[in-house]
Amino acid sequence: MSQRIFGAVLLLACAGLSIIAWGYHAPFSYEPVGPRAYPLLLLILLGLGAVYLLVKPASNTAHSDEPPLDKHVIRKVVGCVVILTIYAALFEPLGFVLASLIFGIAMARLYEGTWVASVVSGVVLAIGLYLLFDKVLDVPLPLGILSALEI
Protein backbone atom coordinates (compact mmCIF):
# COMPACT_ATOMS: atom_id res chain seq x y z
CA MET A 1 0.00 0.00 0.00
CA SER A 2 2.81 2.43 0.83
CA GLN A 3 4.27 1.92 -2.67
CA ARG A 4 0.96 2.97 -4.24
CA ILE A 5 0.78 6.07 -2.03
CA PHE A 6 4.37 6.93 -2.95
CA GLY A 7 3.57 6.35 -6.64
CA ALA A 8 0.54 8.66 -6.49
CA VAL A 9 2.48 11.43 -4.71
CA LEU A 10 5.38 11.04 -7.14
CA LEU A 11 3.05 11.19 -10.15
CA LEU A 12 1.45 14.38 -8.83
CA ALA A 13 4.87 15.90 -8.19
CA CYS A 14 6.00 14.96 -11.72
CA ALA A 15 2.87 16.54 -13.21
CA GLY A 16 3.38 19.77 -11.28
CA LEU A 17 7.07 19.97 -12.07
CA SER A 18 6.38 19.21 -15.74
CA ILE A 19 4.04 22.19 -15.93
CA ILE A 20 6.74 24.39 -14.42
CA ALA A 21 9.47 22.96 -16.69
CA TRP A 22 7.34 23.27 -19.82
CA GLY A 23 7.09 27.03 -19.38
CA TYR A 24 10.81 27.51 -18.86
CA HIS A 25 12.55 29.47 -21.60
CA ALA A 26 16.13 30.67 -21.24
CA PRO A 27 16.92 34.19 -22.45
CA PHE A 28 19.60 32.69 -24.70
CA SER A 29 20.04 29.34 -26.36
CA TYR A 30 23.23 27.50 -25.54
CA GLU A 31 22.22 23.99 -26.52
CA PRO A 32 20.26 22.66 -29.48
CA VAL A 33 17.67 20.77 -27.41
CA GLY A 34 17.00 23.73 -25.11
CA PRO A 35 17.14 23.97 -21.32
CA ARG A 36 13.80 22.29 -20.66
CA ALA A 37 14.46 18.99 -22.46
CA TYR A 38 16.59 17.42 -19.72
CA PRO A 39 14.21 18.02 -16.79
CA LEU A 40 11.23 16.99 -18.90
CA LEU A 41 12.95 13.74 -19.88
CA LEU A 42 13.74 12.97 -16.25
CA LEU A 43 10.19 13.80 -15.20
CA ILE A 44 8.78 11.51 -17.90
CA LEU A 45 10.96 8.65 -16.65
CA LEU A 46 9.98 9.35 -13.04
CA GLY A 47 6.32 9.52 -14.08
CA LEU A 48 6.55 6.16 -15.83
CA GLY A 49 8.04 4.66 -12.68
CA ALA A 50 5.22 6.18 -10.62
CA VAL A 51 2.59 4.74 -12.98
CA TYR A 52 4.23 1.33 -12.65
CA LEU A 53 4.00 1.58 -8.86
CA LEU A 54 0.31 2.43 -9.17
CA VAL A 55 -0.72 -0.32 -11.60
CA LYS A 56 1.51 -3.25 -10.72
CA PRO A 57 -0.36 -6.15 -9.23
CA ALA A 58 -0.11 -6.53 -5.48
CA SER A 59 1.75 -9.61 -4.35
CA ASN A 60 0.94 -11.85 -1.42
CA THR A 61 4.32 -11.05 0.05
CA ALA A 62 4.01 -7.27 -0.25
CA HIS A 63 5.33 -6.73 3.27
CA SER A 64 8.44 -8.81 2.64
CA ASP A 65 9.20 -6.94 -0.61
CA GLU A 66 10.26 -3.82 1.27
CA PRO A 67 13.41 -3.99 3.36
CA PRO A 68 12.99 -2.94 6.98
CA LEU A 69 14.18 0.55 7.83
CA ASP A 70 17.11 -0.64 9.90
CA LYS A 71 20.62 0.68 10.52
CA HIS A 72 21.93 -0.91 7.31
CA VAL A 73 19.33 0.80 5.07
CA ILE A 74 19.69 4.17 6.80
CA ARG A 75 23.47 3.98 6.40
CA LYS A 76 23.07 3.45 2.64
CA VAL A 77 20.59 6.30 2.30
CA VAL A 78 22.87 8.68 4.20
CA GLY A 79 25.85 7.43 2.18
CA CYS A 80 23.98 8.08 -1.07
CA VAL A 81 23.13 11.65 0.00
CA VAL A 82 26.75 12.30 1.00
CA ILE A 83 28.05 10.90 -2.30
CA LEU A 84 25.58 13.04 -4.29
CA THR A 85 26.63 16.14 -2.31
CA ILE A 86 30.29 15.46 -3.00
CA TYR A 87 29.47 14.90 -6.68
CA ALA A 88 27.73 18.27 -6.86
CA ALA A 89 30.69 19.96 -5.15
CA LEU A 90 33.26 18.36 -7.48
CA PHE A 91 31.28 18.79 -10.71
CA GLU A 92 32.69 22.20 -11.69
CA PRO A 93 36.27 22.01 -10.36
CA LEU A 94 37.04 18.46 -11.53
CA GLY A 95 34.71 18.46 -14.52
CA PHE A 96 31.97 16.06 -15.56
CA VAL A 97 34.16 13.09 -16.46
CA LEU A 98 36.26 12.89 -13.28
CA ALA A 99 33.38 13.80 -10.95
CA SER A 100 31.17 11.17 -12.60
CA LEU A 101 33.98 8.60 -12.41
CA ILE A 102 34.33 9.18 -8.66
CA PHE A 103 30.54 9.15 -8.26
CA GLY A 104 30.16 5.88 -10.17
CA ILE A 105 32.88 4.12 -8.21
CA ALA A 106 31.58 5.41 -4.85
CA MET A 107 27.99 4.37 -5.57
CA ALA A 108 29.04 0.91 -6.75
CA ARG A 109 31.16 0.44 -3.63
CA LEU A 110 28.31 1.67 -1.42
CA TYR A 111 26.13 -1.09 -2.84
CA GLU A 112 28.88 -3.68 -2.31
CA GLY A 113 30.31 -3.93 -5.80
CA THR A 114 33.79 -5.35 -6.15
CA TRP A 115 36.61 -2.91 -6.84
CA VAL A 116 37.03 -4.16 -10.40
CA ALA A 117 33.32 -3.93 -11.19
CA SER A 118 33.10 -0.52 -9.50
CA VAL A 119 35.99 0.96 -11.47
CA VAL A 120 34.80 -0.51 -14.77
CA SER A 121 31.24 0.72 -14.24
CA GLY A 122 32.52 4.15 -13.15
CA VAL A 123 34.66 4.50 -16.28
CA VAL A 124 31.85 3.33 -18.58
CA LEU A 125 29.35 5.64 -16.84
CA ALA A 126 31.59 8.72 -16.97
CA ILE A 127 32.83 8.33 -20.54
CA GLY A 128 29.55 7.01 -21.92
CA LEU A 129 27.47 9.84 -20.47
CA TYR A 130 30.04 12.41 -21.57
CA LEU A 131 29.94 11.13 -25.14
CA LEU A 132 26.14 10.98 -25.09
CA PHE A 133 25.63 14.52 -23.81
CA ASP A 134 28.57 16.32 -25.39
CA LYS A 135 28.87 14.59 -28.74
CA VAL A 136 25.39 13.19 -29.51
CA LEU A 137 23.07 15.70 -27.78
CA ASP A 138 25.54 18.61 -28.15
CA VAL A 139 25.10 19.65 -24.51
CA PRO A 140 28.31 21.30 -23.27
CA LEU A 141 29.66 19.81 -20.06
CA PRO A 142 32.47 21.19 -17.89
CA LEU A 143 35.77 19.40 -18.35
CA GLY A 144 37.42 20.91 -15.26
CA ILE A 145 41.03 19.86 -14.97
CA LEU A 146 40.75 17.85 -18.20
CA SER A 147 39.99 20.98 -20.25
CA ALA A 148 43.53 20.90 -21.69
CA LEU A 149 42.57 17.69 -23.53
CA GLU A 150 39.72 19.38 -25.43
CA ILE A 151 40.28 19.63 -29.16
Image (cartoon, rainbow, N blue to C red):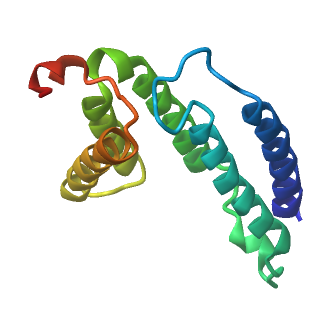
Q: Position of residue 147 (x, y in %)?
A: 18, 20
Judging depth in this view, the residue of 6 and 39 nearest the camera is 39
Quarter holding residue 58: bottom right
Q: Is residue 109 above or below residue 1?
A: above
Judging depth in this view, the residue of 77 and 32 nearest the camera is 32
The residue at 24%/59% (across/down) is 117
Q: Position of residue 80 (x, y in %)?
A: 51, 38
Quarter holding residue 145: top left
Quarter holding residue 47: bottom right
The residue at 86%/59% (across/down) is 2
The residue at 48%/31% (across/down) is 84
Exactly how many numbered labels are in the figure?
A: 0
Looking at the image, residue 148 sits to the left or right of residue 17; the answer is left
Q: Is residue 90 visible?
A: no
Looking at the image, residue 72 sits to the left or right of residue 124; the answer is right
For the N terminus, the quadrant is bottom right
Looking at the image, residue 78 sits to the left or right of residue 53; the answer is left
Q: Position of residue 13 (x, y in %)?
A: 83, 42
Looking at the image, residue 129 sits to the left or right of residue 151; the answer is right
Q: Is residue 25 visible?
A: yes
The residue at 36%/50% (across/down) is 108
Which residue reaches farthest bottom?
60
For the C terminus, the quadrant is top left
Q: Is residue 149 above or below residue 114?
A: above
